[in-house]
Image: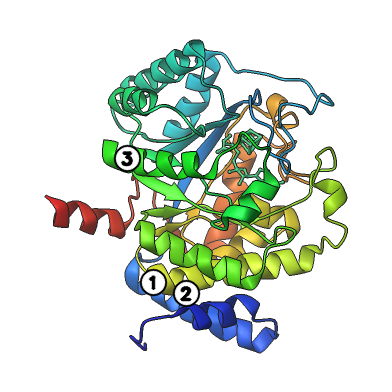
Amino acid sequence: MSTTPIDRQDLIRMIASEKTDERQVLYDNAYRLKLEQVGKLVYFRGIIEFSNICTKNCYYCGIRRDNTAFSRFSMKEDEVLDCAKLAHDYRYGSIVLQAGERNDPDFVSFVEKVVRRIKQMSDNGLGITLSLGEQSPETYRRWFEAGAHRYLIRIETSNRSLYQSLHPEDHDFDRRMACISELRKIGYQVGTGVMIGLPGQTEEDLAEDILFFKKLDVDMIGMGPYIVHHDTPMAGKSPEFNPVRQLRLGLNMIAATRLALKDVNIAATTALQALDPRGRELGLQAGANIIMPNITYTRYRSSYQLYDNKPCLDENAGLCRACLSHRITGIGEDIGYNEWGDSPHFAKRRFEYK
Ligand code: SAH
Ligand code: SF4
């Protein structure tokens, strides 16, 4: 495989690629590089979406503060523990705790306690990733000390003015950037990502996003296509929403990111599946190596809809598990059970900095 560094123009070409045969070459190259750099094992992160209460008001998101068209929930400590236990019994290796953003002391203590209890329950077996938005350095530290070791915080777009157009005035790009560097300083493995195919976003913007990931030297990428939620201010601004284009851009971005970043973990996110029943498998075949099965209690799933057509709302964790392992072995990949599945990038980085 060519070792010529990939530049901005190459990235733009890959992202804009439309012809089927051209895209197949792109995906095959990314797939080969994935096998070489991170292997053929797909790692599972069982995701628990434990509360849809959010103090923020992002214009694209279905659970934004001002959307009153659905009921809010917060799982109890024991319920979260129960879901985590399921992931442990299923030998998933890692879980993700995700929710709307809250910064109040009760929430901070709740998460701290839950993380500690999951670590104890699994005898330190389960790796814990948090995806709980912007918090103070003190909060990040407390959660890290309780046992969380990875944190996902998408920058959403690295284009500052586009970011501003997607958020109310008090949502601050610089603050989000500062969170990423704070998390790194504390010692988390940090993941970031963007929404792909946003109204007003160009292929150049997406290429810049990949260069941004590279500059930040992140360990994991969780990005996915933007999907309209009908009850949001952005719904009216997305008249040309085209699922076929969204899926294509999503897969092109995975492949281009794999080719540019090489040894990081890249998730095939659920948003891909919302656009195509085989979306996540296509993501794996375009260079992703992580899947996040939903292990939230079925009764809460319909109240956690960041976007329309979210799949698997009426399935339980057992069904998700059976369906996923079938899908993954069906494309000739294997599942990395009982392992945290940290990225080789993180392992190298840690070694270099010791
Ligand atoms: N509140 C936390 C975590 C939950 S939201 C946070 O915002 O970081 C997790 C991710 O969902 C967001 O980062 C955003 O990229 C994604 N998301 C929200 N609305 C979406 C939509 N309409 N389409 C696609 N992704 C969306
Ligand atoms: Fe809240 Fe996250 Fe949705 Fe923004 S994207 S409204 S912070 S849940």
Between residue 176 and residue 311, name the one nearer to us.
176
Q: Nearer the viewer, mark 3 or mark 2?
A: 3
Helix, strand or loop at label 3? It is loop
- The crowd level at tag 1 (other Cα within 10 Å; few <14, some 14-19, many 20+) is some
Q: Which residue is at a point 37% across and 62% down the rendered structure image?
A: 215
Q: Which residue is at a point 64% across and 40% down the rendered structure image?
A: 319
Instruction: Tell me the kind of residue under disc 2.
Output: Tyr
Q: Which residue is at a point 48% across and 65% down the rendered structure image?
A: 210
Earlier residue among tags 3 and 2: 2
Helix, strand or loop at label 2? It is helix
Q: Position of residue 156 (x, y in %)?
A: 58, 50
Q: Which residue is mark 2?
A: 31
Instruction: Tell me the kind of residue under disc 3.
Output: Tyr
Picture layout, residue 323 above or below residue 73: below
Residue 92 appears anywhere in the view: no
Instruction: Tell me the kind of residue under disc 1.
Output: Leu
Helix, strand or loop at label 1? It is helix
Between residue 233 and residue 188, name the one nearer to us.
233
As drawn, the residue found furthest toward the top would be: 106
Q: Position of residue 57 (x, y in %)?
A: 69, 33
In the drawing, what numbered circle is on residue 35? 1
Picture layout, residue 17 above or below residue 293: below
- The crowd level at tag 2 (other Cα within 10 Å; few <14, some 14-19, many 20+) is many
Residue 323 appears anywhere in the view: yes
Pointer 1 and pointer 2: residues touching (CB < 8 Å)? Answer: yes
Report, in whole angstroms, how far the alpha carbon at label 3 lies from the one at label 2. Answer: 27 Å
Q: Position of residue 295 (x, y in %)?
A: 57, 34
Report, in whole angstroms, how far the alpha carbon at label 1 lies from the one at label 2. Answer: 6 Å
Query: Which quadrant of the figure shows ligand 1?
Result: top right
Q: Nearer the viewer, mark 1 or mark 3?
A: 3
Q: Which residue is mark 3?
A: 188
* Quarter of the figure that contains the N terminus: bottom left
